[in-house]
Image (cartoon, helix red, strand yellow):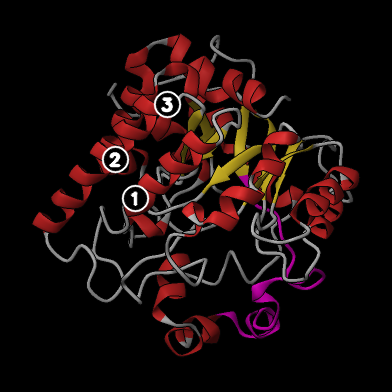
Amino acid sequence: MTDPLTTSLQGVVPAIVDTHIHQWDPFTTPREASRLAPLYRRAPRLFERLLPVLLPQAKRELVLTAEHVAQPYLPEDYARDAAETVEAVGVPVEAAVHVQAGWHRPDPSEETAWLETLPFGAPGRPELAAVVGTADPRAPDFGAQLDAHARASERFRGIRFMTTWHPDRGVMDWIDEPGVMTSTSFLRGFAAVAERGLTFDAYVYSHQLPEVVTLAREHPETTIVLDHYAPPVGVCGPMGRSTARTEGERRDLLARWRDDLAQLAGTCPNVVAKHSGLAFPTLGHRERGLTRQQLAERVAPLVEHTTQVFGPDRLLFGSNYPMDKSVASYGVVVGALADLLADGGPDLLRKVFRHNARAVYRL
């Protein structure tokens, strides 16, 4: 890693493409936070003090604070955060890919249609480059849902269906049972993704990486994008009721993640990985306001191993904003990643921060 605060992208890329952001408004669209958002708006300090009562452990540890999920996060908010990259690495953010963010109504294509109404691309704001929606491959009308997304936006490029499940009941699950990605119904339905030439963002925990291997081998013609390093939950600090409580447990967790990630990268050429979620609380981050150097030191094992096993042509940058905002600012996230990748040279930086995104999501 280079000295902190020294890596610049000037002369490497004209601007950054961020492949993982979320937009929401719990007051005007159906979100999980819609019920509690009015309470937060009326008394934010009281709400934060009552967070242990209002939210179960798994959700508290996922967000750390209600500040960023109980309020709207829209193009102007993202533009303010992303503007930090000019000072951090010398270039702006040009465009972003929105990834589904918990639309709570039966028709998931409504979220895609809603995104088309947002003022992306206005002066001083990044463009909306692509949309990754959601749909359940097990659903009997899965293909029809994909087609509805495509009708809602010409930017629609693929789906994410979150299958994270953890045996620790204090860790956030996004599905109610394990092994979904390797079920017969999921694998059969997934053919509709391949038939339409769409991408699939896979969000799993590290112990579920073998499931991604099964899916990628079953559908080798589909580009699968691994989100957030398939987070080894607690690798940076204890999580849940009993996960990663000791240094030894965290070392074992990291070692298994390294082996499983290497197998995925080495045997499934249709899988690419996002350098995203560097400051995601799920990794075990608890402190708020990490510096660029602090964040880089913490996540160096994840960034370096992922870069090594996937290589320069199969890596993308994603901020995971605003989910990572509770731990680190946007400029810190981008700067820490640039510092960690700098030794790989300008070609690696160029591909991670811009070129690969354009190829994977057909921008």
On the image, numbered disc 3 is attached to which residue? 338
Of 141 and 57, nearer the camera is: 141
State the residue at coordinates (83%, 52%). 144
Residue type (three-letter) at the residue carrying disc 1: Ser
Q: Secondary structure at mark 3?
A: helix
State the residue at coordinates (70%, 56%). 135
Note whether 198 is above or below 179 in the view shown: above
- Residue 125's tag is none
| Left or right of 166 on screen, residue 250 | left
Q: CA distance from mark 3 to mark 2?
A: 25 Å
On the image, numbered disc 1 is attached to which residue? 206
On the image, numbered disc 2 is attached to which residue? 260
Choose the circle earlier in sequence order: 3 or 2: 2
Q: CA distance from mark 1 to mark 2?
A: 8 Å
Residue 322 in view in this figure: no
Dot 1: few (<14), some (14–19), or many (≥20) neighbours within 10 Å? many
Dot 2: few (<14), some (14–19), or many (≥20) neighbours within 10 Å? some
Check whether the beta carbons of the residues at disc 1 and disc 2 lie within 8 A of each other. Answer: yes
